[in-house]
Image (spheres, rainbow, N blue to C red):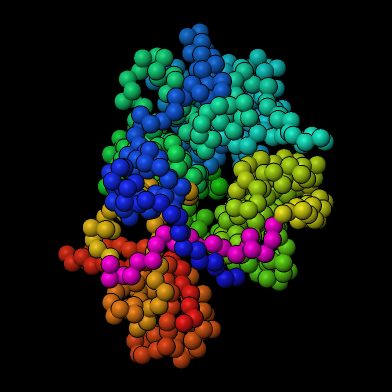
Amino acid sequence: MREKWILENKKADFRGLAQAAGVSPLLAKLAVNRGYETEEKIREYFFGTLRSLHDPRLLKDAEAAAALIRKTLAEGGRVGIASDFDVDGIFSALILWKAIRRLGGEAKIYTPDRVAEGYGLNMRIVAAAKEDGISLLLTCDNGIAAPEPVAYAEELGIATIVTDHHEVPFTEREGGGRDWHLPPARAIVNPKRADCRYPDKNLCGAGVAYKLSQILYGTAGVPEKDLSELLSYAAVATVADVMDLTGENRILVREGLALLKKTENVGLQALMAVTGVDPEKLGAYHIGFILGPCFNAAGRLATVEQAFSLLTAASMEEALPLALDLKQLNDSRKDMTKAGVEQGKRIIEEQALYRMPVMVVYLPGCHESLAGIIAGRLRETYHHPVYVIVDAETGLKGSGRSIEAYSMFENLQRCSELLTRFGGHPMAAGLSLPKENLDAFVRRINENTGLCEEDFRPVVRIDAVVPIEMLSEQGIEELGRLEPCGKGNKRPVFAEQHFSVHAAKILGKNRNVLKLLVENEQGCRMDAMFYGDREEWDAYIREEFGSAALEALYEGRPNPIDLGFVYYPSVNTYRGFRTIQIVIEHYCRIKR
């Protein structure tokens, strides 16, 4: 599989846009590359604030939901919150729990057992809520695909409100068009509803919960500053749920990260302490790859109650052992994931599954909570849509991760009669099915996919060609204005075609980091860091330049290695000295 490098070459009056928006021409070009092509959009991209967010009342049923919550609290009713077991579910529930307590009410959180019950609201939760005397049940980050449990709750006299952000189930009409299937709840707050006029459809579950809390606080006269804590939780969920960091999400995360740096939540403070995250340097990376996975590990390998206990801890003394437990759970999850990925790769190679448009990998013995992570890693390796299927208590369960050209949710709709249940997004989905249906599922999911060979070739989009001698500390600092970076708002990357690679050193506790000394055609030498797969790097150098060249590289001797790099620049600080270096994201031999 060879990557396709594309230089973004959008045309615009970058100097004019920069002057009008109050940024540099480089920042204007980077904004245009990301689809912000007018002065107004560029200004909002760099300077948007909470005041730029849309009115939460534009969310269909949001005011009705808030009114029902207020009525329930006024009558002394008990509120239940039906959550889920991932980061978005955890923080959605925390937001609603905090909001209801701030309004003087009490709420109890219910979560499904991942292994025994699977995703979302179920009959057992509804029955437990009835037994606990719950009069109003709110779902968060789930519920849109749970018509039976919602109907059951209503039959038992429990009013229901669904807050969710997942795709609404539908059936295709014979003559074209779709029939949408909504659960029979009193209010359904989900921007993905076809009849919802909310402008930004990309909120996560916690973002929807935050919006509902805005209405609740506004009508109750709660000071606006009290929303700050809830905003920080929405930021965690938005990053951890891998939502596009565009539009409102970008503002929510940027403002939320600033609040998280000085959070008063001792649970988050403790987790940052045990994972070595400096609050002052907290960024989207730390949430996505360090803190978020710890909360996910609770839902995957233990119980979500551990996460809630940490987040509601009253003291650091109480929080620290809970945080350490979550970190250790996540460490175990990493080891199990690595083994599952290696097993998945062996199966794909042995069975030549890469020849199929959609790869369905059956991993007997794999912990079902790891299926989604493993599917994501296999998708990164093969750049195909991947489903990982595992054994469950009844039948099989699976989780999928997709590529841009393929909508998982819509294609699951087309073989829904083979599935016990399913749900998700275009880029990720979960499903359950009887074991005897697996072969039929593999056939059906690979029919009429609409995918072609070009879709399986990863595309690397380059912002600009920048010779490394043009890099400066001031320019690198300026690039920080694009933060938070992540899905939908990629970190700016540059390229240069020909580098001689003079030497390589292996660093890191796990010997998985390469430090290279590189030199471009203008004679500018610089350190370059590579954090990718070192074995793949060695194999590529050996294939393109020979084993002798690879040996010479590690010994610091002259060699014929000549590579093009896609990189981002950074400033390395060591013993008080600051030097510019580049971090290599992609490499390729470019013929002269």
Residue 387 seen in this snapshot: yes
Percent position of residue 82, x then y: 57, 29
Q: Count the marks.
A: 0
Q: Is residue 592 above or below residue 388?
A: below
Quadrant assignment, res 351: bottom right
**Magenta span includes 464:** yes
Say left or right for 502 vs 297.
left
Q: Is residue 7 above or below residue 400?
A: below
Q: Residue at x 41, y 30 (%)?
A: 53
Q: Is residue 105 above or below residue 361?
A: above
Q: Residue at x 23, y 61 (%)?
A: 473
Percent position of residue 544, x then y: 51, 84
Residue 164 seen in this snapshot: no
Quadrant assignment, res 318: top left
Q: Residue at x 56, y 34 (%)?
A: 165
Camera-side residue of 558 and 79: 558
Camera-side residue of 117 and 83: 83
Q: Residue at x 40, y 42 (%)?
A: 38
Write the start and end of the magenta stretch as one range.
451-470
**Magenta span includes 323:** no
Q: Residue farthest to the top?
A: 75
Say left or right for 578 vs 237.
left
Camera-side residue of 415 and 140: 415
Percent position of residue 570, x then y: 30, 62
Percent position of residue 338, x then y: 54, 63
Q: Name the quadrant of the N terminus.
A: bottom right
